[in-house]
Image (cartoon, rainbow, N blue to C red):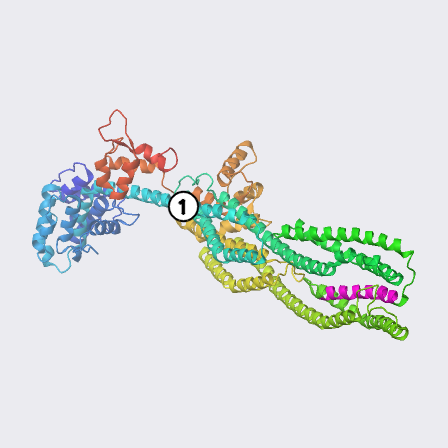
Amino acid sequence: MLLLEVISGERLAKPERGKMRVHKISNVNKALDFIASKGVKLVSIGAEEIVDGNVKMTLGMIWTIILRFAIQDISVEETSAKEGLLLWCQRKTAPYKNVNIQNFHISWKDGLGFCALIHRHRPELIDYGKLRKDDPLTNLNTAFDVAEKYLDIPKMLDAEDIIGTLRPDEKAIMTYVSCYYHAFSGAQKAETAANRICKVLAVNQENEQLMEDYEKLASDLLEWIRRTIPWLENRAPENTMQAMQQKLEDFRDYRRLHKPPKVQEKCQLEINFNTLQTKLRLSNRPAFMPSEGKMVSDINNAWGGLEQAEKGYEEWLLNEIRRLERLDHLAEKFRQKASIHESWTDGKEAMLQQKDYETATLSEIKALLKKHEAFESDLAAHQDRVEQIAAIAQELNELDYYDSPSVNARCQKICDQWDNLGALTQKRREALERTEKLLETIDQLYLEYAKRAAPFNNWMEGAMEDLQDTFIVHTIEEIQGLTTAHEQFKATLPDADKERQAILGIHNEVSKIVQTYHVNMAGTNPYTTITPHEINGKWEHVRQLVPRRDQALMEEHARQQQNERLRKQFGAQANVIGPWIQTKMEEIGRISIEMHGTLEDQLNHLRQYEKSIVNYKPKIDQLEGDHQLIQEALIFDNKHTNYTMEHIRVGWEQLLTTIARTINEVENQILTRDAKGISQEQMNEFRASFNHFDRDHSGTLGPEEFKACLISLGYDIGNDAQGEAEFARIMSIVDPNRLGVVTFQAFIDFMSRETADTDTADQVMASFKILAGDKNYITVDELRRELPPDQAEYCIARMAPYNGRDAVPGALDYMSFSTALYGESDL
């Protein structure tokens, strides 16, 4: 009856002897009603069994009472009372290597578990280092005595009974251990508060480290771009083809060796930035704003400038190589023509200045006059060559040829000499015409020989010049055109040979006349210096140059055929790789918006996809090798494909960046799902709703599409002013930059934020208040006692001094620190 009075809190009537049983049953029923009112279910236990002394029923009721009022309220991480109490014991005794709590019976027989619980919370009460596992009786009695004396926990257990029993009573030990839990519950709250603060501070420290890593990587990449662009913008020309080829080789090394790692760093920078922003959103922190000039958009702008400079540099290199090739060709052509002209003019000035007509006979004067006429004809024939020499020199000057001064000097000398020849020729003609009236006899055969030999000689010199002329072509059609012209020239050789025979026949006729009539002509033609020997020599030279020209044209034709094979080989590969890259880009876009399996399945699919893309790299490298062969062969156009190597490179880099960015988006979705507790079914539902309203498959929703999607998910957004205001609030969350579109990541963040439970500044503030003992400030000693050393020092370094009226020396303001962690104020 006394036990029942204690439970119910009422004074029970003392039964009289005759009514003893009835009153006992009445008293017990009152106690049972009170127990039932506290939510305790008593199954098959009645007042009669207890009054009649049913030991089993009575003990069962007592255990139910103990379980309800002493153990049931115990909860650790949302477990049951028994599991929570066991988990609490395991955590508290974890630092003690010789204690292993797995149950509430044999794990406590050596007494070290009870001593460890006391020592963990009150280390001054027990010298734990002197306890021995092989002396359980001393251990148990020490724990029971200390608990009774200092913790007000009565001795509910007997040490000898525990040692002497193979399996101690589980309920008795659980009841006794629950007293320890309640005795130390205040310390448990402080530990929970400290754990919360440690968690929040760990997240903050990790985010700060990610920010520092981003800033360093961005700075390094921008510095590399800053150093590289001036090199690409350097347009200082070289004077030789070899020097420009070396520059082109340096540029290829930059493309192959230096740029690819920076492309990877740029991609990793974007991935780190997206991951950091996702972690900040998930931990309810403000978004990360990089330093000025280090935003992802700034990196992309700088990269765009790099690629623009790179493209301009390559175009400049190729144009310079073409220019130098053209200059070398023109310079060689100038030297050949100048040498031929200088050889022709050698001695002409001295000849024109002779006074031989003063002592000549009439026939000699006639001969001199005709000879001079032949010379003038020859002079006129050479006028085109002089003009060609001047035109080539002018073109070399316009193309900024490095040796222009020497070319100009030689050209000026030729022009001055040509002008002097013209003046001397005119002067000699005037002298001969004055003498012609006195001299009338002339040898028509010599004259005819001179007139026909001079143009034929010029024709042979022109033929030799053309046959030795260098040529430069870039296509098979051009070399075929030269070959056709050469064949046409060879077709004229029989007629030319007839002309040569006719000219030689005139000379033979002169010789016959001289021999027949014994004319004293001194064996020379007075009208020309061209001898039959020279004609035959030059004709033989022409005949020797023809097969050489044939060989040169054949070799060039073979080279152009090889160039055409290179063009076709490159075009065939580029026409396959270009569409393949475009197809892969489209397939990645479809994968990012379709739902097939879990996010992990999609991530595995994307990684396999990425592996297959990376395995395609050898074909890109092979195409690079073919492109290098094309450039080394100085091939500048390709009619077999519309793709250039630049197109393929840009497409390949975009493909690698797109697959990496898509994988990062799925990883962030998994991170959001796990952090916010979103189930796979919810994630599929969100994706299905998003895809349903993304009718143009762009991966984004417009405002009206997003509004319809929210309504389909159960959001009540009316068409009235209140509904428009609510929708405007939601749009400011999912589209903070006012771009007018909502991405799937922003959509998932919003849906998870609406349902998830995250730490707040108020919760952290309440945790600090527990550690501070309900004070409005906290001290350095309290922080160092309750928190791990690194996080305690983190707080001490960042907390502002507390300036309230109740402040003490060294007091710190944990309230402003808590709000600063969530961006509500400044640290």
What is the quadrant of residue 552 in the picture? bottom right
Q: Is residue 462 left or right of residue 23?
A: right
Nearest to the observer: residue 689 or residue 632: 632
The part of the chain drawn in magenta is 446-467
Q: Is residue 536 left or right of residue 747?
A: right
Q: Position of residue 322 (x, y in %)?
A: 63, 56
- Disc 1 target residue: 216
Residue type at mark 1 is Lys
What is the quadrant of residue 510 in the picture? bottom right
Residue in view at x 40 percent, y 45 percent: 216
* Residue 485 lies within the magenta run: no
Nearest to the observer: residue 614 or residue 822: 614
Residue 760 visible in the current orientation:
yes
Q: Position of residue 370 (x, y in %)?
A: 86, 60
Question: What secondary structure characterizes most of the magenta part?
Answer: helix
Nearest to the observer: residue 576 or residue 131: 576
* Residue 456 lies within the magenta run: yes
Position of the N terminus, as image quadrant, is top left
Position of the C terminus, as image quadrant, is top left
Q: Position of residue 246 (x, y in %)?
A: 53, 57
Residue 52 visible in the current orientation:
no
* Image vertical order of residue 3 relative to residue 265, above or below: above
Nearest to the observer: residue 142 or residue 250: 250
Q: Is residue 263 left or right of residue 16?
A: right
